[in-house]
Image (cartoon, rainbow, N blue to C red):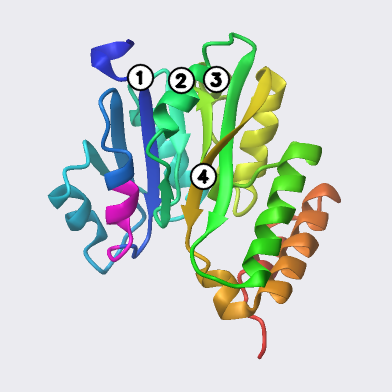
Amino acid sequence: MPREGVAISVVIPTLNEQSRIGRALACTALPGVERIVVDGGSRDGTAETARFLRAERVVASAPGRARQMDAGYREARGEVVLFLHADTELDPTWRDAALHALEDPATAGGAFRLRFEGPGLGLRLVEWGARLRSRLGGLPYGDQGLFVRKRLLDAAGGIAPVPIFEDLDLVKLIKRGGRLALLPQCARTSARRYERNGALRQVLRNQAALAGYFLRLPRSRVAAWYRRRPAA
C-alpha cells in the first residue's frame, strides 16, 4: 500500500452541507482511505462537523467546486484520488471495486453507477439515462463519484479553476490517460435539484448546458445561466 498506508484519498468539496456531510464521511471511513473535506466558506458548521466526525483533514479553500477539488487533490497522500459530492453515499464495496479495477495498468480512473434517493418514475428514468450516457457516451458526471490516478492530475498541473464542467474535464483527463472503468457499485446521491426544479425540466437544463460545453461557449455564461433558478 502506498504512502503511510493510504491507497485512496477521498476529496469532498463542501459549502453549507452540515446536514449531509455525515453520510459521505461514514461510507468512506475505511482502512487505506483518507478523507479530505475542502470547505468553501460554509456558515452552517460544516467544517466543524467534519472535524467532529473525524475526517482526516479539513482544509479551507476559496469557494467553487473546481478550486476546492484542486485544493484537496494537492493535500492527497494516496496514489488514487476520488472526488465525492458531500450529499453522496457509496456502496460498502466501493473501495475494493475501485482498487480491483486499477490493478489493470491500462485503467486510468473510473466512476460508479448513479442512484438517486427517493421514489418516482422520473428519477428512475434519469438514472437510466445516466447509465446510457456513461456506457455509450463514456461520460459519467461528478455525482457518480469520479476517481483518477493522482499522477495524471500531477501531469496536468491539477484541476483548472473553471466555473462549471470540472467533472467533464476530469473525465477527459482520465480517458486521455487510459481506460475509464464504470463500476456497478452505486453512488447514491440527493435528488434535491430534480425535486426542486422538476425532473424533466432539470434534464433539459442539463442537456442545454452540456450542448454549451461541446459548442465551447464561454463557461462563465453557461454557469450563470445554469445556476439561475428556473421560473415556476
Question: Is residue 160 among the parts visible in the rendering?
Answer: no
Per the image, the residue denoted by label 3 is 101
Judge from the rendering whether residue 183 lies leftward or rightward of residue 122; answer left or right: left
Instruction: Using the image as rendered, state which of residue 174 and residue 198 is in the foreground.
Output: 198
Magenta segment, which residues? 18-25
Question: Marks 3 and 1: in contact by CB < 8 Å?
Answer: no
Asked if 206 appears above or below 201 in the picture, the reply is above
In primary-sequence order, the first of circles 4 and 2 is: 2
Type of amino acid at the residue the image marks with label 3: Ala
Residue 47 image position (x, y, % from top left): 23, 55
Per the image, the residue denoted by label 4 is 186
Which image quadrant is residue 157 in? Answer: top right
Residue 20 is a magenta residue: yes
In primary-sequence order, the first of circles 3 and 4 is: 3
Q: Residue at x 68, y 17 (%)?
A: 178
Q: Between tags 2 and 1, which lies in front?
A: 2
Residue 220 image position (x, y, % from top left): 67, 59
Q: Between tags 4 and 2, which lies in front?
A: 4
Per the image, the residue denoted by label 1 is 7
Type of amino acid at the residue the image marks with label 2: Leu
Q: Badge 4: few (under 14), some or many (20 or more) residues near its Cα, within 10 Å?
A: many
Question: Marks 1 and 2: in contact by CB < 8 Å?
Answer: yes
Judge from the rendering whether residue 134 lies leftward or rightward of residue 19; answer left or right: right
Question: Marks 2 and 4: in contact by CB < 8 Å?
Answer: no
- Residue lying at the far left of the rendered structure: 52
Judge from the rendering whether residue 212 lies leftward or rightward of residue 63; answer left or right: right
